[in-house]
Image (tube, rainbow, N blue to C red):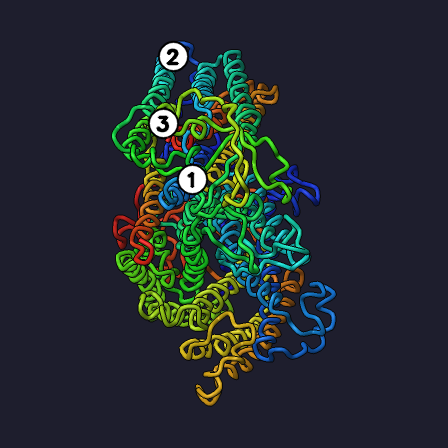
Amino acid sequence: MDSSASVDTHHEPHAHDAAHEHHELGFWRKYIFSTDHKVIGIQYLISGLIFLFFGFCLMMLMRWQLAYPGHELPVIGKWLPHIFGPESMPDGKMTPNFYNSLGAMHGTIMIFLGVVPIAFAAFGNFVVPLQIGAPDMAFPKVNMASYWAFFIGGSIMLISFFVPGGAAKGGWTSYTPLAAFDDTGPGRLVVFNGQTLWLIAFIFLITSSLLGAINFIPTIIQLRAKGLTWMRLPVFVWTEFVTAFLLLLAFPPLEAAIIMQLMDRVAHTSFFLPAGLVLNGAPVSISGGGSPLLWQHLFWFLGHPEVYVLVLPAFGIVAEILANNSRKPLWGYKAHVFAVLTIGFLSFIVWAHHMWLTGMGSGVSAFFQTTTILISVPSVIILSAFFISLWGGSIRFTVPMLFTIAFLPMFGIGGLTGIPLAFNSADLYLHDTYYVIAHFHYLVAPGTIFAIFGGIYYWFPKATGRKMNDFWGRVHFWPTLICMNAIFLPMFLQGMAGMHRRWYDGGQGWNVANDHTIWGLTGFEWNKPISWAAWIMGLAQIPFIINFFWSIKHGKKVNDNPWEATTLEWTAPSPPPHGNFVHTPVAYRGPYEYSLPGRDRDFTMQNEPVEPAERTRRKPPAESVLV
Amino acid sequence: MEIPYTVSTRPDTGLWNAKVGIWLFLASEVMLFGGLFSAYIFLRIDAPPGTWPRGVLNVPVGTFNTSILIISSVMVVLAWASLKMRRYRAYWWYMLGTILCGIVFLVIKLGYEWPLDYVHFGAYIKPEALGKYEQYLGNAYAAEKDLPPRLEITGHLHNQAALKDPNIKEYEVALDPLNAYPTNPEVDRPHFFPLPVTDKIAKIEKEDVERATMFLPTHSTYFASYFTITGLHGAHVLGGVLVFIYLWLPVSKRLYQSNPEHLANRVEVAGLFWHFVDLIWIFVFPLFYLL
Amino acid sequence: MNNPPDVSQDPKEFEEYAHGIRKHVRGYLMVGITLLVFTALTVALSYVNFGTHKANIAVAVLVAAFKAGLVAAIFMHLAAEKRLIYRILIFTGFFVLGLFWLTLFAWYDYPIFR
């Protein structure tokens, strides 16, 4: 814990500065159109956080309508129509169309513009090359293209709020045939309408993800430092590696589906449209012969791996922080690795469990139920290994660790409540209720987003050379944790009472809700405490936002390895210069050598050579040949 | 630190970075076209009898275009081999040949084949009116010979205005041979050289027609997938041509002079992409033209 | 064949190496001709009646698969490639077949309309 730890980071900052003077680039090349993986990572992080907050704001608006349906939204209700158009909230009262837009865009933005860019791209870009001892990503220009494709996609998504009719309303799943006719007709433009822009934005986002994935995998395969064998990789690198494969192979079928839906909307084809459709009382002039089920298959072929795209990087971040703050090697490293690989593999063949209600036959159902239950096994292995890692550790309750520890039970709740949904018969009842909302939000919101917060607090010193404020970090953490649970726990109850997730009036018009109470409140009345919890949680993010930006300039200055961690990124200067490392790093040992017996410090970095005295104490594989 | 293994190979994988990258990219392309082809299979199996057109594309032109792509693939690989043997001049010529092949392919596809479809007309007859047009459809004959039912009358539309104008009550169509002589065994199966449109004109009343369009994506799921897949394939060809033009321009000669192996690697990567585009076409051709 | 070592400055070694490439060139030409022949073959076979239309589809897809295999094996050097690339492609192949098979399986197992 003493400050002398900095002495052991193998570099001399002054020698370094001189060597890189000739690399000085202008402002635009350095911070905007940069090819440096660290800058791109930070660009991803900041844009992702903005989108995350924006998506959260959309949800806070929805929560008003759910808690107080038909009431005028106080204060901001007056000027929202000036932003989102007169059709959105006339007199401060939300229209059903606008409510649908908010729902669809909340899902889309949170997943594709918030969590994936942060968890996969931001942390991946910033941390992975540093952790594997590489100077940059394998293809820096492709990396920049990836960010800018994301930026364009995100911008189109935002622009779609301001076209006639507003943003897409078809839900983040955009099921056909509804989505094929959404935002068409009188008063709607041909291309500049919500759903079409949603599709076009998606093409850019998919391109961005593909370019990212094509970059990550060769980086991890080709640019690992000398001695950094596969079984010495930090778990975060493993999870990014598998995530990249998921994006690489799962996104293209969705891209194909997006192109086909775009054709359905623009060229009036019938890929996803059966014959005999009637729209507003008139038969639609299309050839028919398409299949709405086809869209669902192609969508969920991405949709399910996408869930693991959200979750796996969170596992990685948690593994890093957990090992570091429990001062103990991560328990079951190999089990982790193989569990992550298994999840990656199985996630491709479980997708139809999102489609139980479409009426699949028993054979297919049996297949997908089996694989879905199978995939819970590796997830449980990982979570159990996390819990066991805590056992007997000398835990440091730092802010990143708080988020990480909170992640474990939250993710556990989310995962275990998913098991009933895996079974066809239980899902028939729970499908499309608030139960499902609660289930996957427990995985993603207090799950992945907590890991993201933890990761931000954890790697912030590496990116800036300064620590974020500890006190305000705690002020951020506790209300967030409490509100998260106040939001999502009651949703399980609402869902089991049968409340449908897409009701515009929050279930007010639903009679059963009024005479069946859960803990003294009806299903509809539960909306109020949930909404208040959501708004308070919004307030609880303010300390984080201020802390984040304030600490960039004014945070406490720290050395290169403030957490006394072992992985290679902490051997680089903070912030790392262009090219990252002063000396080419070499790895001599595994990633989590904490509390190694016979050492005077409780952490041993990966680039510390194995001492002769150590050799006799160690099992042979640990000093395997350098590759 | 510089990024390692951009040209030389990493000992444990035996590969340089871009080669891993391009193969991953191709893997994603396999999934992209896999999604489209799986949609094709799904739609085709799902199509009711008689709604999946056959023999409507020009096979000789398609065969020619297939050959063009194969030849261009050979030239790319020869260009790469020339670079490996350090014969820049030969490389330059092969590259030019590839680019020209790509352009010829695109011009034929977009400038000739697609427009040929736009001017063709098809009208699906309502089930209750099929008997009325038996002389053009020959469904009794088709049933006897175990051919798929014929629900559509195709040909060249003489009164184009009929598509838009609700006052015109009938379509005047110069019939395709199938509808002109439906009971002639000659037209049971598609022909290699497409038979020209006859001068026999049929008048089809609009109220008997379920749906009438030109051969556009909206005509049927067949044309929808045809235009989508060939359009996307065409976009890939265009992308490949642009990359080859870059590799052929004098910019690349400078790279050749400083690091010939680097240029050879780039050509190999671009070539792998090009072969893949060729490979996709090898499946597109029979699936849409012949079957 | 792929990734030849950095070409040696030694003219004799280079000559040997260039000779190896030249041998491949002949192979590439042969493959090109084979592909053209099979293109003609697939067109011709499509006008032969194999009994059912399904049989015709099977034949055409088989010929196409053979041609695609040639392109992949020779032009794309897959006949002798590094293990890593095979691994990537095995997974891709597995998942693309999974996509095909499972969507079709779901379709044929559809109790209401089939």
Same subunit, labels 1 and 2: the answer reads no
> Mark 1: which secondary structure?
loop
Q: Residue at x 31, y 69 (%)?
A: A425
Q: Is residue A288 above or below residue B226?
A: below
Indicate the chain on which mark 2 is placed. Answer: C
Indicate the chain on which mark 1 is placed. Answer: B
**Is the C terminus of chain B in the top left, top right, bottom left or bottom right quadrant?**
top left
Q: Is residue A605 visible?
A: no
Percent x, y of residue A301: 40, 52
Q: Residue at x 38, y 42 (%)?
A: B44
- Name the residue carrying label 1: B151
Q: CA distance from mark 1 to mark 2?
A: 57 Å
Picture quarter containing residue B32?
Answer: top left
Q: Nearer the viewer, residue C65 or B136?
A: B136
Q: Mark 1 is on which residue type?
A: Leu
* Residue at far bottom of view: A520
Indicate the chain on which mark 3 is placed. Answer: B
Picture quarter containing residue A324?
Answer: bottom left
Q: Nearer the viewer, residue A592 or A174?
A: A174
Q: Is residue A284 above or below residue A50?
A: above
On residue C22, the disc is: 2
Percent x, y of residue A578: 58, 43
Q: Residue at x 56, y 63 (%)?
A: A106
Percent x, y of residue C52: 27, 33
Same subunit, labels 3 and 1: the answer reads yes
Q: CA distance from mark 3 to mark 1?
A: 16 Å
Q: Earlier in the sequence, mark 3 or mark 1?
A: 1
Q: Is residue A444 visible?
A: yes
- Name the residue carrying label 3: B189
Percent x, y of residue C18: 40, 13
